[in-house]
Amino acid sequence: MVNFQDKVQFLWTIAEILRGPYKPDDYGKVILPMAVLRRFDCVLQDTKEEVLEQYEKYKNLPEEARDEILNRVSGQRFNNTSNYDFGKLINDSDNIADNFRDYINGFSKVARDIIEYFDFDTQIEKMDRNDLLYLTVKRFSEIDLHPETVSNLEMGYIFEELIRRYSEHAEAGDHYTPREVVRLMVGLMFNEDEDILTKPGITQTLYDSCAGTGGMGSIAQEYLKDLNPSAELEFFAQEFNEESYAMCKADILIKGEEARNIRFGNTLSRDAFPNETFDYLITNPPYGVEWKPAEKTVREEHEDLGHEGRFGAGLPRIGDGQLLFLQNLVSKMKPVTEENPKGSRLTIIMNGSPLFTGDAGSGESEIRRYVIENDLVEGIVAMPPSLFYNTGISTYIWILTNNKEPWRQGKIQLVNAVDFYQKMRKSLGEKRHEISEEQIKEIIKLYGEFKEGEHVKIFDNEDFGYQKIVVERPLKLNFKADNERIKRLYEQKAFQNLAKTKKKGEAGLKEEKEGQKKQQNIVKALQSMSDGLLYKNREEFTDVLKQTLKEYGVDTKATLVKTILAALSEKDETADACVKNKKGDVEPDPDLRDTENVPLKEDIHEYFEREVLPHVPDSWVDKSKTKIGYEIPFTRHFYKYKELRPSEEIKDEIQELEARILEKLKKVLE
């Protein structure tokens, strides 16, 4: 690409004009839309006069019909009917703001919408107010972005680099995806798909639910063209950041593709492609970002539509919506049919949280359970650290398909590619590492070979499942009616409430006195039992207690008896187990309750007898509480034990360091 970096550098140095009224974080608000406008201007340059002539003939037609005619004249999917262009704008510095607005308003609706989403009129007003507008337009008029000078592919690179520089100031959860990461994702997505890579003239669809500026779509198209020049990949996308949406749509428009395929809105709360399915799906969702703004709509879809909607498998915790975006992609996979025997493939890059966050029965675990039990997860690739510009977080590429090759069915492949990187000569924000083209090919080769090795592990789907069992132990209590335990009765809420009332006046006073008398009778009854006898059977003590209370004229309601038992009891391993009903079912002790995760492939009874009973012989499994869970402990499967250094070696090193420190201290004190 000729002078690519020179053009990027020239465009970005224009930002120096903005210094002062604009903070560096805000340069992109001017540079990006101005770059789009200049590209539009250059693209329409050759047909400008002819378009103006035809406009005079058809200006009274409805806008939609007129645009159709003028687009044919311009040879693009948009046109401009203003008498101004960048060359003419700089001839009138006094009226630059009005003329510039006239120029922008002259664009056809699809291009005008793009500029509106940039909220560029606010910047025009600000630049004009600070005497910067004319200078900015003049500088942009000096760069030639004509298609004969800068191809669509090269322009895509220029946009990409400008966006990358702008994204260095983005929020932590909004990650611009580096080019080499996208190329790897695309390579894994197209893996083993011979049709799209070799079949002449094939047309397929690609969908990105968090499109940003459309980089993933552009790189996927470029990747495919290199391998199959006659193939077409039609790009569909949704984005809810207004500036990113505008850039994405502008890029599509400039390349002559269908701009209507790029739609605005929050994917979770307002699906722009309902009931549509695609051949390929790809995205980089926001990491660890709350989905609260979409909560109401998402919950309604989950509860009302179930698996007929997008979120039937489950809802993750409100603080992280990554698995919602995964479910959205899965819902848009083409079903395998006779007409479409190959189904769909998707890649999504997420942080580590979706692998293991959430216990059995949680929303996250249920989502993992759905995609694994339905044999959708083909593989996961662990990425090197420090690849993104504004976060050093660990990331993982998930590869899903609803039509696995026979040898992959029922299997999940893990590829540990954390060491497949090279250090950059100069860091860009948090980005200190990059993946070379050779390393991308090596990772794809490892994945495609489907053979276990140092960097590859292959598991059955069930290997990631487990049964969370609840292990109970009996409640064992002793009972005694002595002064110390009787005092505890006054701490019991139910006992305190006996002498309280909501009634007012005399009626209230009367009820309080009656309650106090009842409390006194209870205490007298218990004191009469203060014979020092320690009971180790709750049923035996309960019978004695009820009989004594009756003798003192106290009713033996269940709640009252329960309150007294709670005050007079203490845990005692030597006591009899408490039973909870007439059938003799043992009551569990909630303080001794424990859980065990039993591998899904293992029999619970056998596991329990081997791992639990030898240690706690009186325990049992409450089968009604057993839950199925799924997690993918990626790091554990590739853990390598490093032998600890000998203590003598560490001791020698410490002594050597101490000697050096003492030597330096002597020099300071001399």
Image (spheres, grey):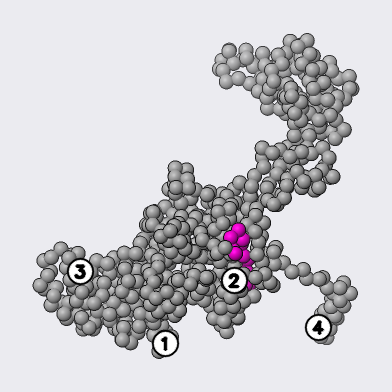
Where's residue 434, x and y in %? 56, 78
Q: In this view, does 592 lie to the left or right of 304?
A: right
Q: Earlier in the sequence, mark 2 or mark 4?
A: 2
Q: Name the residue under label 3.
A: 68
Amino acid beneath label 3: Glu
- Quote the CA–CA distance across marks 2 and 4: 54 Å
Q: What element carries label 3?
A: helix
Amino acid beneath label 1: Met
Nearer the observer, 87 or 646: 646
**Numbered circle sitting on residue 664:** 4
Where's residue 246, x and y in %? 35, 68
User: In the image, is residue 604 above or below residue 438?
Assistant: above
Q: Residue at x 46, y 51 (%)?
A: 310
- Quote the CA–CA distance across marks 4 and 1: 56 Å
Q: Is mark 1 on a helix, strand or loop?
A: loop
Q: Within the magenta stretch, is there residue 411?
A: yes
Q: Is mark 4 on a helix, strand or loop?
A: helix
Amino acid beneath label 4: Lys
Q: Where does the magenta region start and end?
A: 407-418
Q: Which of marks 4 and 1 is in front?
A: 1
Where's residue 48, x and y in %? 20, 80
Q: In which quarter of the image is the N terminus?
A: bottom left
Q: Which of marks 1 and 3 is nearer the N terminus?
A: 1
